[in-house]
Image (cartoon, rainbow, N blue to C red):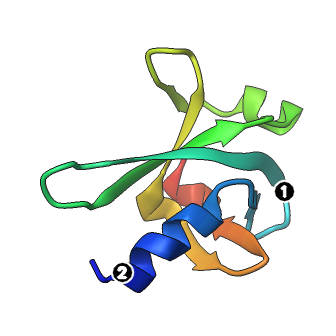
Amino acid sequence: MMVEDKKSVKLLVGKTIVSKAGRRFGEVGNLTFETRTGELLQIVLKNPTSYCDALDLDRDKNGNLLIPYSAVIAIGDFIVVAEEDII
């Protein structure tokens, strides 16, 4: 991971997460990663929308909803995730 990548991770916190269809999930509260490799594993949702209630999302030990980072397909003004990779 390059220094530029580390900066961009900080820029992800607070971004809105949406599906390809435009459904809003919430915002990035934090990221979990593999400490040994630095691989991003999950996005911790902040301010989840009521839409998330209908999904069977994993939760962390504090009860926060998690989205697998592998579902991310685009990062720009929003973080776009492939809903089919989540549910």
Relative placement, left or right, of 87 versus 27 is left
Quadrant occupied by the N terminus: bottom left
Tell me the amino acid under the disc marked 2: Val
Of the pair 87 and 7, the residue shown nearer to us: 7
- Residue at the extreme top of the image, as rendered: 62
Q: Which residue occupies 73% across, 62% down?
A: 19
Q: Look at the numbered disc 1 and give the secondary structure of its residue.
A: loop
- Which residue is rendered at x = 42% and y = 78% of the image? 5
Residue bearing mark 1: 23
Q: How busy is the neighbourhood of tag 2: few (under 14 within 10 Å), some, or many (20 plus)?
A: few
Tell me the quarter of the image containing the C terminus: top right
Horizontal relation, residue 4 to residue 51: left or right: left
Q: Is residue 76 above or below residue 22?
A: below
Q: Earlier in the sequence, mark 2 or mark 1?
A: 2
User: Residue 60 at what x, y percent from top left?
Assistant: 46, 24
Specify the label residue 3 is tagged with.
Answer: 2
Does 71 sit left or right of 28 as displayed? left
Q: Residue at x 62, y 64 (%)?
A: 12
